[in-house]
Amino acid sequence: MLDVSLHAGYEEGPFFYVTGRHEGTNHFIDEAQEFLGLSDDLVKDLTEWDDEYQSYYNPDVPQDSGFPSVEVKRAWVERGRKLAPRIKQESSKDITVHYQANGSIERGDCVF
């Protein structure tokens, strides 16, 4: 079984998994689509979710990056919580999905 984490980070792919080379790395959505066998509809929703997160990055003052409000963050986290089980359901591989949002959910707390 392959462990997949959905964990958004600024300027990096939101998927983390170990490939056959035994190297864990972040993967962008298009890479994960091909490797995991995800539908175009799910990829569209994941891209919108990740694009929103990336839009809050301030490259000039990185420490000022972040959600504009608690409510916006909460809504974004919940959207991701609905996307994670879809990854598990759609993948052509035998996987476990750990949803971590932007690190605000501990690994193992939200598993599908």
Image (spheres, rainbow, N blue to C red):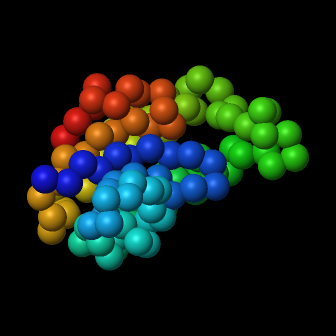
Measuring 12% from the left and 58% from the top, which residue is drawn there? Answer: 94
Q: Is residue 95 above or below residue 82?
A: below
Measuring 48% from the left and 32% from the top, which residue is drawn there? Answer: 103
Q: Is residue 14 above or below residue 31?
A: above
Residue 6, given in percent of the width and then of the height, sits at 38, 47
Total number of numbered discs in the rendering: 0
Measuring 29% from the left and 50% from the top, which residue is drawn there? Answer: 4
Q: Is residue 83 left or right of residue 1?
A: right
Toward the viewer: 21 or 50? 21
Toward the viewer: 61 or 1? 1
Q: Is residue 105 above or below residue 9?
A: above
Q: Is residue 68 visible?
A: yes
Q: Is residue 44 visible?
A: no
Residue 75, given in percent of the width and then of the height, sits at 48, 34
Extreme-right residue of the structure: 60
Q: Quadrant of residue 56?
A: top right
Q: Is residue 107 left or right of residue 62?
A: left
Q: Is residue 42 left or right of residue 101?
A: left
Residue 60, given in percent of the width and then of the height, sits at 87, 46
Q: Quadrant of residue 19?
A: bottom left
Measuring 59% from the left and 23% from the top, which residue is drawn there? Answer: 70
Residue 69, given in percent of the width and then of the height, sits at 65, 27
Q: Quadrant of residue 41?
A: bottom left
Q: Where's the C terminus, which quadrant?
A: top left
